[in-house]
Image: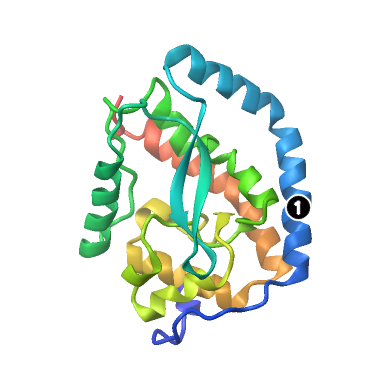
Amino acid sequence: ATHLFKNMLRRPTQTKSLPRWKRVFDVVGATIGLILFSPLIILVSLYIKLVSRGPVLFKHKRYGYLGQPLFVWKFRSMHVDANPAEHHQHVMNMVRDDTQLRKLDTETQLIPLGKWLRCSAIDEVPQLLNVLKGEMSLVGPRPDVLPIDQYQPWQQTRFEVLPGLTGLWQVNGKNHTTFNEMNQLDATYVEHRSLWLDLKIVFLTVPAILKQVAEDLFSPDASS
């Protein structure tokens, strides 16, 4: 999909109207998702309380539409005393070196089965609440930990739409892409977004997650 990316020297982020169809799509999709996933939400909540002290959910500061800060909800996959500064430094290192974007999965910081919660994206299910609140969309660039001023002007295109629960990056390699490649995919989505593209990305998300689970948990190099 990166061959669709054009115009690397885009203007800085500016206000754009969000299409009405997208809000309808988000509200309907998030409502259905919460209903369908309600048994899973209950089971995961009970499991986290059983294996680890602390809250079931945690909120993490990210940056979304027009670079505005927001707090995204996630199931807690790490112990409460885990150091968030390590994750931020890990992101900064990947951006600086333009290396493959991989999560910092320090085994000692993860709760039991925490890695599985992450690679299966189950930890991100609570972000359906962010979608209902209008802070996120079902489809769009992922809300990032870096503020907008740490992006180059051409990369700021990603902030012209609501951040998404899934997106073009997730279904086109994700952990096999670099920071620049992620931004190219995000810019491609902004240029070509449509109801049809959103539907296509949603349907491609499940096989993309299953592939990621297989790679992270069952590959010969996967850690125990």
Type of the residue with mark 1: Val
Choose top left, top right, bottom left or bottom right for residue 128.
top right
Query: How far across and down, in percent of the image, does residue 207 sit?
Result: 57, 46
The answer to whether 162 appears left or right of 92 in the picture is right
Residue 134, x across and y down, in percent: 66, 56
Q: Which residue is mark 1?
A: 27
Q: Residue 201: x percent and y percent?
A: 62, 58
| Residue 162 to residue 79: above or below | below
Answer above or below: position of 81 versus 132: above
Relative height, residue 59 to residue 77 (above, below) = below
| Camera-nearest residue between 74 and 95 | 74
In which quadrant will I find the C terminus?
top left
- Name above or below for residue 87 compared with residue 173: above
Rate crowding at label 1 as few (under 14), some (14 to 19) or many (20 or more) other CA atoms within 10 Å.
Answer: some
Q: Residue at x 55, y 60 (%)?
A: 163
Q: Is residue 98 visible?
A: no
Q: Secondary structure at mark 1?
A: helix
Depth order, front residue of 99/156: 156
Can you see residue 22?
A: yes
Tally of marks:
1
Closest to the observer: 49 or 38?
49
Residue lying at the far front in this picture: please name it. 69
| Picture quadrant where residue 145 is located | bottom left
Colour scheme used in the picture? rainbow
Identified at 58% across, 79% down, the residue is: 15
Horizontal and vertical percent position of residue 20 = 77, 69
Q: Is residue 139 left or right of residue 118?
A: right
**With 88 as the anchor, is 165 left or right in this view?**
right
